[in-house]
Image: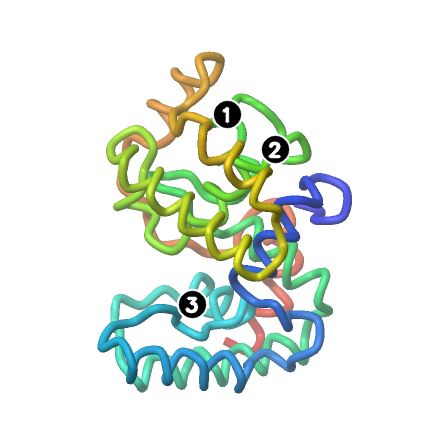
């Protein structure tokens, strides 16, 4: 996946604004995001945002572990810094877009866009983009074919925060929230088939992940 040519710019704008607004300026770890996440947890008593950068999420995808602990987070931070030393920002983003999980066996933005909406990711609407931003955070619990209500709520939370941050206008967000959350009629069969099985551990083994992942894997 080439983020610059194969993915809708609106999706990339939402992704970076929601997940990693300082992606192009940090070295793999964003101390400000981690501090904000800690403050939110302390004030609200639950996790509002994890503070993980795109690069940290990529490190987790390349080295899947079910462990969720302070040690695991620290390990991701170290791996993220190492990845940043091996790959450029555009390469990291391309690799993340190739490996991100979207429910079932759907891996990568292109597979998800075709399976759920029957279109290439460079033609996504705002509503579709917001949904695909939300899915990788909890891909199995927000699967369109099984939990459309959870997917709907997650999409709307992305839109709400984008309005608060001034990324999306209230009018555009309202129009996007009115869109149904479901596989398109043209993609219903692919959606059912592609997301039927549980997601397997992901490794950078194909397409862009083959060459870029090989380089990044030297530091994993």
Q: Can you tell which quarter of the image residue 219 is in? A: bottom right
The residue indicated by pointer 1 is 117
Secondary element at tag 3 = helix
x and y percent of residue 203 in the render?
A: 46, 56
x and y percent of residue 213 in the render?
A: 59, 61
Q: Nearer the viewer, residue 202 or 188?
A: 188
- Distance, label 3 to label 1, CA atoms, is 27 Å
Locate residue 35 relative to residue 122 in the image: left or right: left
- Asked if the residue under mark 3 is in contact with the one under mark 2, i.e. CB atoms within 8 Å, the reply is no
Q: Can you tell which quarter of the image residue 88 is in? A: bottom right
Query: Relative to 155, is 50 above or below?
Result: below
- Distance, label 2 to label 3, CA atoms, is 26 Å
The residue furthest front is 171
Q: Residue at x 45, y 81 (%)?
A: 36
Q: Nearer the viewer, mark 2 or mark 3?
A: 2
Binning the other alpha carbons within 10 Å of mark 1 as few (below 14), some (14 to 19) or many (20 upward) gives many
Query: Relative to 27, is 195 above or below?
Result: above
Query: Relative to 126, is 49 above or below?
Result: below
The residue indicated by pointer 3 is 60
Q: Quadrant of the N terminus?
A: top right
Q: Nearer the viewer, residue 209 or 15?
A: 15
Q: Nearer the viewer, mark 3 or mark 1?
A: 1
Secondary element at tag 1 = helix
The residue furthest right is 5
x and y percent of residue 130 in the render?
A: 51, 44
Q: Earlier in the sequence, mark 3 or mark 1?
A: 3
- Asked if the residue under mark 2 is in contact with the one under mark 1, i.e. CB atoms within 8 Å, the reply is yes
Q: Residue at x 67, y 80 (%)?
A: 85
Q: Earlier in the sequence, mark 1 or mark 2?
A: 1
Binning the other alpha carbons within 10 Å of mark 2 as few (below 14), some (14 to 19) or many (20 upward) gives some
The residue indicated by pointer 2 is 124
- In the image, which disc is placed on residue 85? none
């Amino acid at each position: 996946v080439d983020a610059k040519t194969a993915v809708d710019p609106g999706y990339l704008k939402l992704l970076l604004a929601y997940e990693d607004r300082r992606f192009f300026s940090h070295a793999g770890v964003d101390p400000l995001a981690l501090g904000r996440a800690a403050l939110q947890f302390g004030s609200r008593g639950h996790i509002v945002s994890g503070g993980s950068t795109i690069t940290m999420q990529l490190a987790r995808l390349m080295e899947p572990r079910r462990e969720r602990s302070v040690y695991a987070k620290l390990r991701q931070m170290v791996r993220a810094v190492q990845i940043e030393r091996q790959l450029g920002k555009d390469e990291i983003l391309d690799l993340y877009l190739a490996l991100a999980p979207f429910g079932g066996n759907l891996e990568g933005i292109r597979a998800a866009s075709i399976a759920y909406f029957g279109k290439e990711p460079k033609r996504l609407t705002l509503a579709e983009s917001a949904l695909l931003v939300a899915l990788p955070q909890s891909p199995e619990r927000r699967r369109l074919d099984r939990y459309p209500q959870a997917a709907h709520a997650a999409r709307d939370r992305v839109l709400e925060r984008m309005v608060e941050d001034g990324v999306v206008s209230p009018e555009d967000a309202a129009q996007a929230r009115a869109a149904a959350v479901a596989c398109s009629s043209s993609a219903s069969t692919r959606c059912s088939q592609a997301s039927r099985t549980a997601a397997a551990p992901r490794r950078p083994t194909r397409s862009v992940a083959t060459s870029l992942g090989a380089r990044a894997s030297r530091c994993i």
